[in-house]
C-alpha cells in the first residue's frame, strides 16, 4: 500500500474536484465537494480496495489525506 496509490483512489471518489488538488497534505474536509455521502464513498472504497473497515470516527480524526492513509495503514 503506497500513499500515491491511496491518494489516486481517494481522489476518484470526487466527481467535481480535479485530481491534481489531492496531495498528502490536502485537508479534504475543507473541500466544497466533501459531504457525508462522499465520506461513505471513501469508507466503501477503503473497504473494497484495502479490506480495512474504517469508521466515522476515523474520518473525523483525520485532517489530511495522509492522516487517513496512516489510519488505514495502521489497521492493515
Image: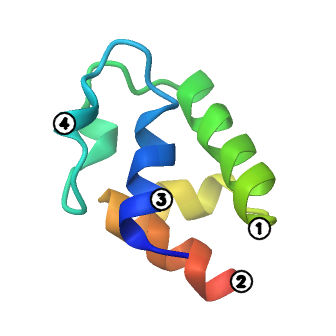
x, y (%) of residue 53?
79, 63
Residue 1 makes an appearance in the image: yes
Residue 47 position (above or below residue 4) = above
Residue lying at the far top in this picture: please name it. Answer: 16
Are discs 2 and 4 less than 8 Å apart at CB? no
Please identify the quarter of the rendering in which residue 62 is found. bottom left
- Of callouts 2 and 1, the N-terminal one: 1
Residue at the image position 61 percent from the left and 23 percent from the top: 37
- Callout 4: helix, strand or loop? helix
x, y (%) of residue 24?
25, 62
The residue that mark 1 highlights is: 52
Residue at mark 2 to residue at mark 4: CA–CA distance? 27 Å
Are discs 1 and 4 less than 8 Å apart at CB? no
- Of callouts 1 and 3, the N-terminal one: 3
- Callout 1: helix, strand or loop? loop
- Of callouts 4 and 3, the N-terminal one: 3
x, y (%) of residue 11?
40, 38
**How busy is the neighbourhood of tag 4: few (under 14 within 10 Å), some, or many (20 plus)?**
few
The residue that mark 4 highlights is: 20
Residue 51 position (above or below residue 35) = below
Residue at mark 1 to residue at mark 4: CA–CA distance? 26 Å
Residue at mark 2 to residue at mark 3: CA–CA distance? 13 Å
**How busy is the neighbourhood of tag 2: few (under 14 within 10 Å), some, or many (20 plus)?**
few
Amino acid at each position: 500500500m503506497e500513499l500515491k496509490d491511496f491518494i489516486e483512489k481517494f481522489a476518484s471518489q470526487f466527481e467535481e474536484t480535479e485530481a491534481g488538488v489531492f496531495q498528502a497534505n490536502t485537508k479534504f474536509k475543507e473541500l466544497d465537494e466533501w459531504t457525508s455521502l462522499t465520506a461513505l464513498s471513501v469508507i466503501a472504497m477503503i473497504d473494497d480496495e484495502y479490506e480495512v473497515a474504517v469508521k466515522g470516527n476515523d474520518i473525523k480524526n483525520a485532517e489530511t489525506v495522509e492522516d487517513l492513509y496512516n489510519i488505514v495503514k495502521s489497521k492493515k
